[in-house]
Amino acid sequence: GHGWVKLRVAITQSCDVTFYHRGKDLGLNTIARSSRLSGIGTPTGIELAGEKAGLVPDPQWSLESRGTPWYPGETISVSIGQGPVLVTPVQMSTMMAAVANGGLRTIPRVAKLDDRPSFASSGGNPVALDAVRDALQAVVMEKGTGARANVPGLEVAGKTGTVQVVRQLTWTRSEDLPYEQRDHAWFASFATGGDKQLVVVVFVEHGGKGSQAAAPLAKRLYEIYFRDFLLSSEPS
């Protein structure tokens, strides 16, 4: 595998084992607290009826919902967003926006408002956020797993992801499974061009790998949104 790697390489190459170790060291309560401060597992407040809260498990949830204690081995799965974790694309958008703007979490809106949005701290350490932003840029711009979202002329940062749909007793390639059992594909990202910034989160049902199915769609959205900036930046 990857061998012993530091955080930047782990994020760039999507090395799960690194995060297994980090999750074990941090413990579930720390993961849950940080996740909720980042907007995961709680409603964002967007003005849409029926917004799902998602789920970030903790020991109390396990006792109340399952009637069983939380087992330390379960933290390993949660450390990479698997197990009982449930998130929505709009939550991922809020989290990526907080990473992009230095740790401030805002309420997403369906339409642009004249008044300034309200912000709340995500609780992120500035040094840690800088390290994460740098690594997320490497995912896209240094031939990491999100390289297919790279747009020359923009600073694009992001993370690919895969959602396992069904439990597998023996490993089977997603493309070899029936369509309705294939993995879902994620790509959560943000880009900067000039004085504009945009967050794009793509979720492709049964799309397989985020690097192949979701990242190219994000690239296309960035090319459209930043078209004028990209054209003005081209050498005459």
Image (cartoon, rainbow, N blue to C red):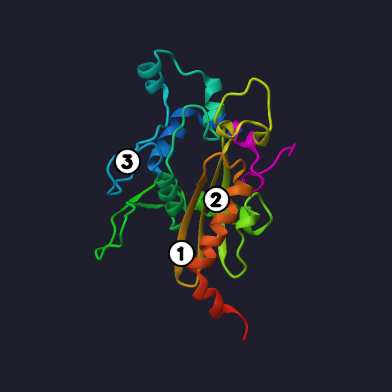
Q: Could you classify mark 1 by the number of other residues whose Cα lies within 10 Å: few (under 14), some (14-19), or many (20 or more)?
A: some
Q: Quadrant of residue 33?
A: top left
Q: Circles 1 and 2: CB distance less than 8 Å?
A: no
What residue is shown at x 63% (from left), y 36% (from top)?
A: 16
Q: Magenta region: which residues? A: 1-20
Secondary element under disc 1, as helix, strand or loop, is: strand
| Residue 213 x/y as whole percent | 60, 48
Q: Which residue is mark 2?
A: 132
Q: Which residue is mark 1?
A: 197
Which numbered disc, 1 or 2, marks the residue that appears first in the sequence?
2
What residue is shown at x 38% (from left), y 42% (from top)?
A: 37
In which quadrant of the rendered image does the C terminus lie? bottom right
Which numbered disc, 3 or 2, marks the residue that appears first in the sequence?
3
| Residue 79 x/y as whole percent | 54, 33
Q: Which residue is mark 3?
A: 51
Q: Could you classify mark 2 by the number of other residues whose Cα lies within 10 Å: few (under 14), some (14-19), or many (20 or more)?
A: some
Tag nearer the camera, 3 or 2: 3
